[in-house]
Image (cartoon, rainbow, N blue to C red):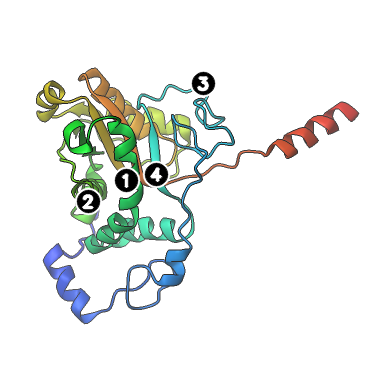
Amino acid sequence: MRVQTYPSAALEGLLNLVLPKRCAGCGTAGAWLCPSCAAGLQTLPEARCPRCGAPSRAAQAGCPECRGRRLWFFSASAAFAYEGPARAMVTTCKFRAYRSLVDEMVARAAPSFAVTCARVAGDLTAAESLLVTWVPAHRDHALERGFNTAELLARGLAASAGVPATALLERRRHGARQSGLGRAARAANVRGSFATGSEAARVARMLKRVIIVDDVYTTGETLSHGAEVLINAGLEPHVFTFARTIRAVPSQTSIDNAVRKERCR
């Protein structure tokens, strides 16, 4: 396998002095996200499934996206829809490997992450009751980029919320890349990939609630398998991602129209 190398953090800092940052959304020089594209970031609506975090007309568990599925995490939330500028930031980070772009993602997602921490912590303060961890990088991704985007996101978001962060999951199997795979194939590909690290047992004696951070929630399979491992270690896992894929859910009007058409046949 040919591995493409990317600049280290120090070299990237020097490059930023010579070559200006360009907006991930439109290419305008000056910042990772220009004001126009920043305005195009789509936050998720208040009405969301409390289980998988998908937009839902009724805020109750078991929405059309997760109904009948075994998802091991207790709740999932995301800062933005995986569309437009948010998608551009994630893909630019993945394929051009700019560490400083992750800092921009952290800054944009921090307000939403703070809300998630408060919700998961409940009556306790986030610093007393929570720990942040991340999805371990696939071997190919780590070799290509030189860093794990999920780890940098997790550490940055944890620092912004005043919550400790540590590695709890380890990769014990590297399957094929998840991109381009359907839900069933993703589930099979990631099965058995994770194990708890050395810190998990110690953490379980101190606290229970953990937030697993990743860049994108696509089908939830990778996050669910990581959550299953943490549950088996005695922890209560929740999920937060920078962005989430939004699947179209038919409106009640379209459903009613379809029913009427079927009755007229």
Q: Amino acid at mark 3?
A: Gly
Q: Residue at x 19, y 79 (%)?
A: 17
**Dots 4 and 2: beta carbons under 8 Å?**
no
**Quarter of the rendering occupied by the C terminus:** top right
Relative horizontal placement of residue 253, taking residue 47 as reference (left or right): right
Choose the circle earlier in sequence order: 2 or 3. 3
| Residue on which disc 4 sits | 78
Task: State whether residue 132 appears in this view.
Answer: no
Choose the circle earlier in sequence order: 4 or 3. 3
Q: Secondary structure at mark 2?
A: helix
Q: Amino acid at mark 4?
A: Ala
| Residue on which disc 1 sits | 113
Choose the circle earlier in sequence order: 1 or 2. 1
Q: Quadrant of residue 118?
A: top left
Judge depth for marks 2 and 3 and give the one in front: 2
Mark 4 crowd level (few <14, some 14–19, many ≥20, 10 Å Cα): many
